[in-house]
Image (cartoon, rainbow, N blue to C red):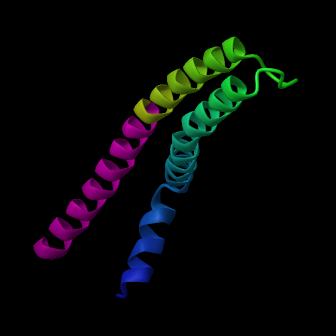
Amino acid sequence: MTTWRLLVRLVRYRPGLYLLNALLAVLAWTLFLAPALLTQQIFDRLSAPKAPDLSITNLLVLLMVVQTLRMFVNVVNLVVDSTFTETVTALLRRNLLAHSLN
């Protein structure tokens, strides 16, 4: 069995959990960039105080919300990733044991 075939079969064992894990990982890495972009906007507002968009206070509140959301997504991603990893590990162990007993 090739490595790719094994990986495809493992993903097909729990496709919903794998998809959720992948989406949360992408979301976590995307949210990793958000504080830097918000901080850039804050410094832009400080250097040009007549910017028409969001005020510095609104940007600071948005930064706190994004950081809180980022922590929440990281915790949920940790739980989902652990669940997926342990589920696949248990399947592999069961199959190895069944193969060695036959």
Q: Which residues are magenta?
A: 76-102
Quarter residue 15 falls in: bottom right
Q: Residue at x 50, y 32 (%)?
A: 73
Front residue (pair 46, 88) = 46
Front residue (pair 29, 101) = 29
Q: Position of residue 33 (x, y in %)?
A: 56, 43
Q: Position of residue 93 (x, y in %)?
A: 20, 61
**Left or right: 27 as drawn, with respect to 7:** right
Q: Is residue 65 above or below residue 20?
A: above
Q: Is residue 39 above or below residue 86?
A: above
**Left or right: 29 as drawn, with respect to 37:** left
Q: Give the farthest residue toward the front.
A: 47
**Left or right: 102 as drawn, with respect to 26:** left
Q: Position of residue 21 (x, y in %)?
A: 49, 48
Quadrant holding the C terminus: bottom left
* Residue 85 inside the magenta-drawn segment: yes
